[in-house]
Amino acid sequence: MKSRRFRMVDYGLIAMMILPILACIVLKVLFTPAGEGVQIAGALVYVEIPAPVMNLYISESQVNSWAVMISILGLCLYLTHGLTAKAVTRRQLIAEWLVEKSEKLVKDNMGGFFAEWGPFIAAIMGLSAFSSLICLVGLFSPTGDVNVTFGWAILVFFLIMFYKFRGGFWNYFKGLFKPIPVFAPMNLIGEIATPVSMAFRHYGNILSGAVISALIGSALTGLSKSLLGALPGILGDIPLLRVGLPAVLSIYFDVFSGVMQAFIFAMLTMLNVAGAVPWDAWNARRKKRNKPEIQNTAA
Amino acid sequence: MLELAMGIMLGLLGLGAGCAMIAGIGPGIGEGNAVAKACEAIGRQPECKSDVTSTMIMGCAIAETTGLYGLIVAILLIFVAPGTFTGILKDAIK
C-alpha cells in the first residue's frame, strides 16, 4: 500500500510534467499577434535583452525547450520514484527497459570503450524527440529553429574534435593532408560539414513538416470557404474540410518524422564520435607515457 | 517604379525558390533505389528484415540531406530574402 506522502510526491511529479507545457501554451496565446487564418512564421520573440555585441533574444524555441527539459526531468523522476530491488511496478519496468535499450544501443554502435555514454545519447534522443513532438499540442517545435539544432550539432562537433585530438595535434594536422596535400581544403570543409549537415538535416525535416502542414491547412480553409461558404449561419464560417485530413498527415510529418530525426541525430552522434578516435596514434602516445593500452571491444 | 521593381523581385525570388527545389529529384531517385534494393534483400533473406529495414531508414534519412539543403535555400528565398532585398531596393530607387 502506497503511503500518503508517496502519492503526494507522485502528483507533484505529474504536475511537473504537465505544467511547463501548459505555461508555454498560455505564454504563446498571450504573445501571438492577432492575424487571420493559418500563417507560416518563425519563433515568436518574447523578450529582447540588450547586450553589447548583439541583442539577446529569448524566443519561443528557447522557452519551449526549457519546458521540454523540465517535463523530461519530471518524467524521469516519476519513472524512478520508489525503485525496489525486484521490479514490481509498471513504471520501474518501463524505466529499466529504457535504460537497458539505450545502453545496448550505445554498446552495439560505439563499442565497449564508450559503454558509459548511454545517458548522454538517451538524453539527446529524448530531448530531440519530445521537442519535435511538442508541436502536437500546438506549440512551436524548438527543433524547427535552426539555432537549437545548431547548438546541439556544435556540442557534438566539440566531442568529435576532443576525440580526434586524442592522437596528438600533429597527428590530426598530418591527417588533413592525406592522401595528397592538394586535398587539404576539402578535408577541412569535410570537418566543418559534419555539424552543418547534422543541424540542417534535423531542422529541415521538422521545418518542412511544419510548412507543409500550414500549407495544407490554409488550402483546405480556402477550399471549404468556396465550397461550403453558401451554408447558412455560422456553418459557412467553420472550415469543415479541415477536420480530419491534417491530423492524418501529421502522423507522418510530425510524429514519424520527428521521432525518426531524433533517432538519426543520436545515431550520427554515436557513429561520428566513435569513428573519430585514432586508436593507433592514441595508444602510441599512451605507450610513451607508460600508460596501459586501451582496446575498444567491438560489439 | 518601386512597385514594378518589387514585383519583378518577388517573381524572381519565387522562380529561384522553385528552381532550388529541383534538388528534390536526386534524393527521390536515390531513396527509391535504396528501398528497391532493401526489398530485394528482404525477399532473399526474410530473416534479417529488421536489420535491413533499420539500415535502410538510416540511409534514406542521410540521402535526404541534399534535398533538404535545396528546401532550406527555397525557404530562405521565400521568407527571408524579400525583407532583405526590399530595403536595398528602396535605397537604390530613392
Image (cartoon, coloured by chain):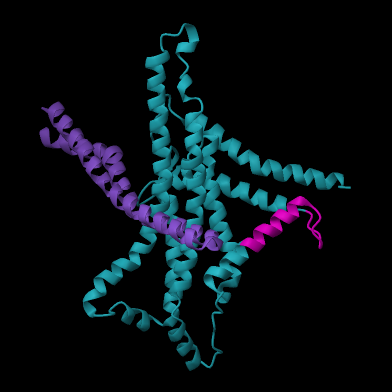
Chain colours: A cyan, B purple
Q: Name the residue: 66% across, 49% down.
A: A75
Instruction: Give me the residue at 46% from left, 19% from top.
Output: A239
The percent position of residue B72, horizontal first and vertical second, equals 32, 47
User: Does residue A249 appear left or right of residue A185 in this picture?
Assistant: right
Residue furthest front as drawn: B44
Quadrant of image for the C terminus of chain B: top left
Is A96 a magenta residue?
A: yes
The majority secondary structure of the magenta stretch comes to helix
Query: Left or right: A122 with respect to A257?
Result: right
Q: Give the percent coordinates (x, y) of residue A38.
A: 41, 28
Q: Residue at x 47, y 93 (%)?
A: A288
The residues colored magenta run A82-101
In this view of the protein, can residue A37 be seen by the observer? no
* Left or right placement of residue A118 versus residue A275 in this view: right
**Image quadrant containing the N terminus of chain B:** top left
Say which of A104 and A131 sits in front.
Answer: A104
The residue that appears at 30% across and 70% down in the rendered structure is A188
Residue A223: quadrant of the picture: top left
